[in-house]
Image: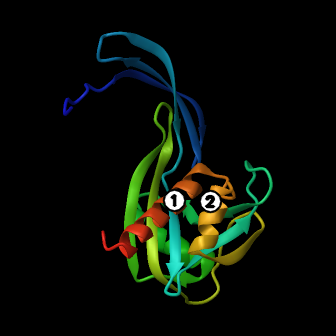
Amino acid sequence: MNSIMPAWNVREREIMLHQPPFLTVERHHVILPDGREIPNWQWVITPEYVNVAAITADNKFVLFRQEKYAVEGMSLAPVGGYLEPGEDPLLAAQRELREESGYVAPDWEHLGRYAVDGNRGAGVAHLYLARGATFAGKGESDDLEAQELVLLTVEEVRRALAAGEFKVLAWATVMALALLRLSEWEQGEA
């Protein structure tokens, strides 16, 4: 099944809310490929961001146990943050790893670029696996939430993921993809 579906056409855009740099909400008047029109399609614009599953040479994931405003209770979290305007996603991932955790890594693998919401936009996530992470000195995170740096084994991360301890979808996704990739590598499929 290789047919390419025609794109939706945007006839008109109107900004409903503009709160730079983190949020813009637009109303789009769209025309579907079959000619139907939707005059009031909400579209959410947020910055692109990165999440990094960083693992040390001795197979421990560099993570945080932290609070987030939109998450109930404590959560495990990978390194992550917004891209600066015009910033390359890989460079943003490397910057965020160093700033937030104090770790650097020589081996980087892009795990994918994903739309946050397929219907409303809401940003794009760039997910990475960083191998061979080593501590290079205290990070300088500007996160507002209380957080604690933790190093967890691959098995501890598997259990935490299965138990729902990564409470943000992108965090669970990057960790699941990293575990899958590490498993493929161990089996010689990489």
Alpha carbon separation for disc pair 2 and 1 = 8 Å
Q: Report which residue position mark 1 lands on.
A: 176
Query: What amino acid does circle 2 point to?
Result: Leu
Q: Quadrant of the N terminus?
A: top left
Which quadrant would residue 189 be assigned to in this image?
Answer: bottom left
Q: How many marks?
A: 2
Quadrant of the image for the C terminus? Answer: bottom left
Count neighbours of disc 2 (C-alpha within 10 A) and say few if under 14, some if 14 to 19, many if 20 or more. Answer: some
For this orientation, the residue located farthest to the top is 36
Residue occupying the far right of the picture = 73
Residue 151 seen in this snapshot: yes
Q: Which residue is at 31% across, 10% downward?
A: 35
In terms of secondary structure, where does tag 2 sit? helix
Give the image location of residue 57, x and y in percent.
Answer: 49, 86
Amino acid found under the numbered disc labelled 1: Ala
Question: At 37% from the left edge and 68% from the top edge, which residue is drawn?
Answer: 184
Q: Is residue 3 above or below residue 38?
A: below
Q: Pointer 2: what residue?
A: 161
Horizontally, residue 174 falls left or right of residue 164, namely left
Callout 1 environment at 10 Å: few (<14), some (14 to 19), or many (20+)? some
Work out whether 117 lies above or below 85: above
Q: Secondary structure at mark 1?
A: helix
Residue 159 coordinates in the image, percent (x, y)? 64, 64
Instruction: Write the residue at 59% across / 72% down.
Output: 155
Q: Give the residue drawn at x 19%, y 33%.
A: 2
- The picture quadrant where one finds residue 150 is bottom right
- Residue 5 appears at what percent x and percent y? 25, 27
| Labels 2 and 1 touching (C-beta < 8 A) | yes
The one nearer the camera, 181 or 75, is 181
